Amino acid sequence: MAGPYASAPAKASGAGPAADALAGTRLPHLASPAAALRQVLAAHAVRHCPHVLEIGGAGLPITGFLTHQPASVTVVDPKIPAHEADALNGVPCRLRHIAAKLQEVALAPPGPYALVLLGLSLKPFGRRGAVSPELLALAAGATVLVIDYALELERAQGQIGALTGTRTDAPAIDLSLTIHDEALRAAGFDRRRFLVYGAA
C-alpha cells in the first residue's frame, strides 16, 4: 500500500462528506462534549509541528481540532471514513484519513512530526504485533508524542511501557484525568492518563 504522503487527487472540502470526515463518527462512549477535551489538549500540544500523524481516531480524529496550519495531517484507523484533501481550514495541507490497520500502511512522515495516540488500544494484525518495531520507531522519532489511555483498559496497560520506553526525555505533561460522563464511566474509560513528550 502506498504511504500516506503519496500524491492523490484532491477531494472536495467544506460542508457535507468532508465536514463529516473531519468531525468523525463518535462512538457511544465518546459522544459527550467532555470527551473531546483530549483532542483539544492534543491539538494544543502539536501546534508547532508541520506534520501530524494520528494512529486511531476513528471516533473523533484530531483533524477538526487543529488550530495551526500543518503541511500534512494523516490519520490511520480501520474504522475511519477514507478521506483525502489538499487543504485544511482553507489552507494548503496534504490531508489523509486512511481506512486501514496500522500494520498495513508504510508510514514515513517527513520533517519534524507529531505522533498522536488518543485512546491507546492497539490490536495485532495477523502475525504482526500491536506494538510493532515500526510504531516504536515512530514514537522515538516524533518531535512531539501525545498518548491518552484509559487506566482500566488492560490492553493499554500492556502497551504504554513499550511506547514510553522509546523516549529519553521525561514527559513535558503528565495529567491524570477523570471525565465525568456516564457513558465513559459505564465503559470503564472515565479515569485516564494524558502524556505529552517533546515541546508542549
Image: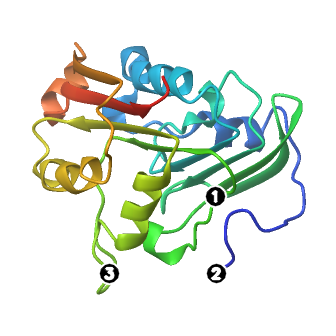
Q: Which residue is at 31% across, 54% downward?
A: 166
The 10 Å Cα crowd at callout 3, few under 14, some 14 to 19, many 20 or more, is few
- Using the image, tell me which numbered label, if any, was put on residue 109: 1
Kind of residue indicated by mark 2: Met
Three-letter code for the amino acid on which mark 1 is drawn: Pro
**CA separation, marks 3 and 2?**
16 Å
* Element on which disc 2 rests: loop
N-terminal label among 3 and 2: 2
> What percent of the width, then of the height, locates residue 11?
87, 52
Percent position (x, y) of residue 112?
63, 45
Q: Is residue 45 left or right of residue 37?
A: right
Amino acid type indicated by mark 3: Arg
Question: Which residue is label 2 attached to?
Answer: 1
N-term mark: 1 or 2: 2
Q: Which label lies toward us, 1 or 2?
A: 1
Please tell me which residue is depicted at 29% across the width and 72% down the height of the picture. Answer: 124
Residue at horizontal 54 percent and vertical 20 percent from the top: 44
- Quote the CA–CA distance across marks 1 and 2: 15 Å
**Mark 1 / mark 3, whichever is N-terminal:** 1
Determine which residue is flagged by label 3: 128
- Name above or below for residue 61 compared with residue 68: below
**Image: 196 above or below 25:** above
For the residue carrying disc 2, how many other residues have a C-alpha within 10 Å: few (<14), some (14-19), or many (20+)? few
Answer with left or right where residue 196 lies relative to residue 110.
left
Q: For the residue carrying disc 1, how many other residues have a C-alpha within 10 Å: few (<14), some (14-19), or many (20+)?
A: many
